[in-house]
Amino acid sequence: MTYPSLEYAPLGMDYQTKKLFDKPISENDLISKLLDSGKGLIAKGGPTDFDIVRSISITQKIIWSFIVHANDPNKYEIIDIVKKLGKFHEMDSPDEPLEFDADNEFEWHHWIRRNYNNGFTPKTRPNHILIVGTPEQIPFGFQSRLSKKPRVGRVCFDSLDDLENYVDKVIRMSEEPPSGLKRHSSFFATNYGKMEDGTYDVTQYSYNELVTPLKQFLEGEKIPVDITRIEEMKKKPMLNKLESNQSALVFFAGHGIGNVPKDKQLQLQGAFCCQDWIETKNDSELFSAFDVPDDEPFLEGAMVINFSCFGYGTPKLDDIVNFSFDGNRIRNSLSDESFVAALPKKLIAHPKGPLGYIGHANSLYLSGFYNLDTSIPDDLKRDISPFESIFDYLFQNNTLGNSIEDMNDNAAMESDRFSDAILRFQGGDKNRETKLEIVNSFFQSHDFDNYLIFGDPAIRLNI
């Protein structure tokens, strides 16, 4: 199958312009505006701060801990609730969590060395850690960096009652699986096809080059799987299917909504654009927290993976620099403050909802799983192995935290590749291969770094 060139295209829709959140970026524009000066590019930390712990086995003992912010006004109430989960995971001192007090990103490395590397012996160092706090208190970037070593998840809810509901749900569903939960995967993917200008929307790629081969992979692993028909990806029929769905793994793929006005941003940013949204542009065709029922079971006991922009949350400042300016690269302001999207908070707080959630805390780009470069052989254009690993780990009864091990490893690898290519470029090697190394590794590091877990990283599918 051939596609028109979209180059570095995002999988997010702008709420206000009703177009792609960012314009597709051509290779030549990137090279001329971004690379020729050889400055202003920053990828998140890879394995340079500390050695990566790899391949935590299914049978290895879980050493669990949690982090609260040192100055959280509800710190002691939070500890009192979460220590129940600590006792469940056999934490040595469940009322003594780690306390985060780093004032800025330059102190993260020192906090990790002081509190994690040097704060434990090798035998007592936690391999699964739950952050309990908002990204304003404990930033997304810190969560991403720390997760290169232990497995890290986060929860932050609108009330302490929601936190207690989640803790109770994890313990209850870990001891007794929800009735009806099936060893089965369901994909809910949009495909907007050809647009008015004759080009194909990016969802053409996510549907054909991500979702479809993932289904083939699962079938090869003897795991029952279905993809919802495109005509059923309109809001109402999609909700009907979700309300009766009993699959252990549910995967969304398509556009997330971005650039939502401030009065609606906390409620709608990161909502999933259903199939009709491309025509109506109405809020009624967004799957958001408003659509999750309060009392009825909804994806009870499942794990949810959301492949869409801002599906996990939105940082205050964008990780992707603004390419529209010549000279200096500017990090766009996305919000007054960093926040977790309302959809995962509502799903995970639901007493009869999902146990865990994997999503993206920024804009996603096509190059994160598919490369359009004509010089690359067809069998190397697509790399969906990190997504295959998520399914493989979870269906083998491994933890949610371990399931994104390949994501974390790839983020570290791409960060190293980026640094190496920048050094070659600054040393005078400015051929096309080096420039493409910089461009591709920058975007792929960005994409892999921002896949984060919402929920306890030590939970497993109980089916």
Image: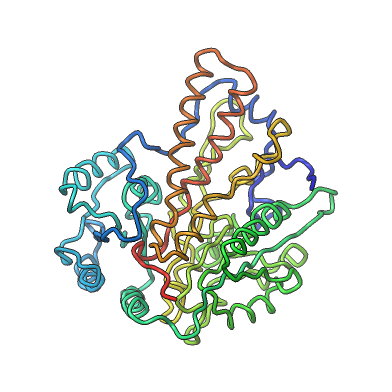
The relative height of residue 148 versus residue 440 in the rendered view (above or below) is below
Residue 45 in the image, given as x and y percentages of width and height: 39, 37
The coloring applied to the image is rainbow
Residue depicted at 37% across the width and 37% down the height: 47
342 sits left or right of 171 in the view: right
- Between 402 and 430, the residue placed more toward the observer is 402
Q: Residue 244 location in percent, x, y?
A: 59, 83
Q: Quadrant of the C terminus?
A: bottom left
Position of 205 compared to 186: left or right? right
Residue drawn at x 49%, y 30% is 417
Q: Nearer the viewer, residue 295 or 20?
A: 295
Q: Above or below — where is 354 with respect to 73?
A: below
Identify which residue is drawn at 65% across, 24% down.
32
Q: Nearer the viewer, residue 390 or 448?
A: 390
Identify which residue, 174 or 5, lies in the foreground. 174
Residue at 14% over, 64% down: 93
Q: In the rendering, at what x and y percent does residue 2 appear?
A: 80, 45
Q: Position of residue 20 (x, y in %)?
A: 68, 51
- Is 330 situated left or right of 280 in this image? left
Number of labelled discs?
Answer: 0
**237 w.r.t. 42: above or below:** below
Q: Quadrant of residue 76?
A: bottom left
In which quadrant of the rendered view does residue 94 lie?
bottom left
